[in-house]
Amino acid sequence: MARVCVPRRSALLVAAGLACSSQAAAQYAAVGSVPGSFIPGIDQPGNRRPITSGTVDDGAAAITIPAAYGNAILAAGAAYATTNGRLIGVSDPAYLNTDLSAAGALPGYYPMWDDLGLWPGPGGVPQTVGVGDEGIYTADTGGVFVVQWNGRPLNEGTSGVPAPQNRFKVQLQLRASGPAAAQFLYQGLGTVSGQSATVGVVQTSPAAAYSQFSFDQAGAIGNSTVVSVVPVPTGACCVPGDLSCVVTDSGNCGSRGGTFNGGAGACAQANCPTPGACCLQNGSCSPSTAAACAGQNGVYRGDSTPCSGANCNQIPSGACCAPAGTCSLKTVFACRASAGLYRGDNSSCGAGVCPRAYVYTGGAQPIPDGMGGSVCGAALHAEVTVPDTFTVGAADASVFVSAQWQGDIQLALVHVNTGTTAWLVRRPGVTESSPYGFGNWYYGDLTNNLPFRATDAGAFVYNSPPNGPLGSGSDYVNGLWKPQTPLAIFSGENAAGTWRLVAQDCANQFPAALDGFILNLTPGAAPACYANCDGSTGQPFLNVQDFSCFLQKFAAGAAYANCDASTTAPTLNVQDFSCFLNKFASGCSAP
């Protein structure tokens, strides 16, 4: 059966505390965080709002949002609370919920968009179906404006009459101040857990901006769940393409390929890169940022360097390290074109210049096919044994994969002895709107011996935003690419032992096979800046990723994690955490 591209049903695990389906430029996010409590006594007869449009089952109550509670989701003034669990700006009684990424999603709050059984009669007077307080209620409690739904899930009843069990209450609290602009809270859900509901927000400008907490996800909500609608932090975004700076949120910044400065709200304090000379392969020069120059496969001469002194038509040669571990003299452009690692202008080949190569000798192996559009098949393991004992300074991996649909494939490198794992490629191109990813052929060009080489020296991650900069893939993609997880995570480990490439095909229909794998390891000492655990070279050198890196190395028992150089067992202990924190606090002037 041919694949049909449809919006993926995005979902959020409550424990994660982060919105997983969020359109760029959204000013608010629906997240599972910020404590809140159900406000009792809202469902008093004087607070019930009559159903003024639609039918007694699928209708809406006209309400007015007080001035203190309006925002970019819904402005103050007229609004409609529908009987199917939405607060929106128009009277739309639709009961069939959809993913908020779908076209035409109406701005507003979606605490529980589902086929609900509020079951009020004409004029808002409830019919007798066992309990008489079904309906929609509103109250301004001073600082909190509450909209409350009392009812039952209609699809649990028969003959169009809601079942008497599972009476529940859903409360939407609009807040005039505080960390959350609104909160969704639930009581008496019973077996109802979000399996047929949409929970999230859509803002008014732009109307396409949304944040979805869950969609048709069983277990997403419960009586203890508090969904908070919080402002999305904004900051300065340095955009490499046009050398501009804009104030936006991190998601929108990432979609532009920019660098987000979360703590710097004004561009004046953002310290965005200044352009410098970029030497191109044809010998020409153009002003560019370092990132934009890398995107053109150019050689960047440094910030503020003029083209007049760049000597772009006189590119020298240097040592070029091939994936197989051999060395030859090439220009930087010729080296990159051969998937080599360039060691610098005028550098020479010699002992220790290139990484040590460990070649997989298992021959071509089929990668078990996946199931459906998103279920991974069994993992293929391709292993090499490193007999040498030395401290890893750098690692990279070269692969040939004959895949007819690149977006099906994910590859990980595992040091079996330590458990350290890094993603090289992870279903490139898969997004909310493109659930199958890049439809291109093959990783690497086996005919011309040009592998796909995952290395921290690559310019970009082979993926689409927000995980990479690409709008589309390339057939037989080869050369140097940054991995999804920085391979610096292996730095400091003892190289000896088993290294495994894990290959998975995560969708059906298109066969794939692993045709080759080379592991490259460079011996090295501890980095000059110890706290720069992930080896990042962009400012700031020290960031939250270094904490994650240190924790993983500590858990893996890596020698690097012995920060205080203790020799008494256990050498890795709580003192190493204190040591790392002190080194991090001391900062670094260079990576």
Image (tube, helix red, strand yellow):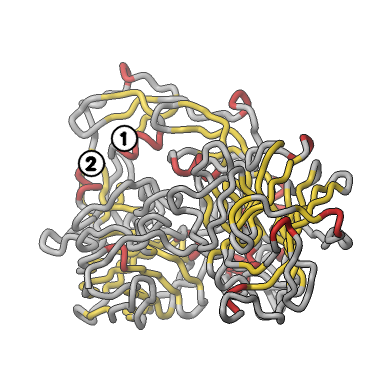
Q: From where the camera sits, is residue 578 visible?
A: no
Q: In this view, does 463 lie above or below 413?
A: above
- Tell me the quarter of the image containing the N terminus: bottom left
Marks 1 & 2, CB-CB < 8 Å contact: yes
Q: Say what amino acid the circle numbered 2 marks.
A: Phe
Which residue is drawn at the image coordinates 80% and 41% (left, top)?
Answer: 176
Query: Which residue was labeled with disc 2?
Result: 333
Indicate left or right for 4 with 250 as reference. left
Pointer 1 local density, CA inside 10 Å: few below 14, some 14–19, many at least 20: many
> Which structural element holds mark 1?
strand
Q: Say what amino acid the circle numbered 1 marks.
A: Val
Name the spot of residue 242 as percent of width and height, x first: 40, 27
> Which structural element holds mark 2?
helix
The front one of 407 and 359 is 407
Q: How many marks?
A: 2
Which residue is drawn at the image coordinates 32% and 77% (left, top)?
Answer: 370
Indicate left or right for 460 with 401 as reference. right
Which residue is drawn at the image coordinates 84% and 47% (left, top)?
Answer: 140
Query: Which residue was labeled with disc 1?
Result: 299
Residue at mark 1 to residue at mark 2: CA–CA distance: 8 Å
Which residue is drawn at the image coordinates 73% and 58% (left, top)?
Answer: 124
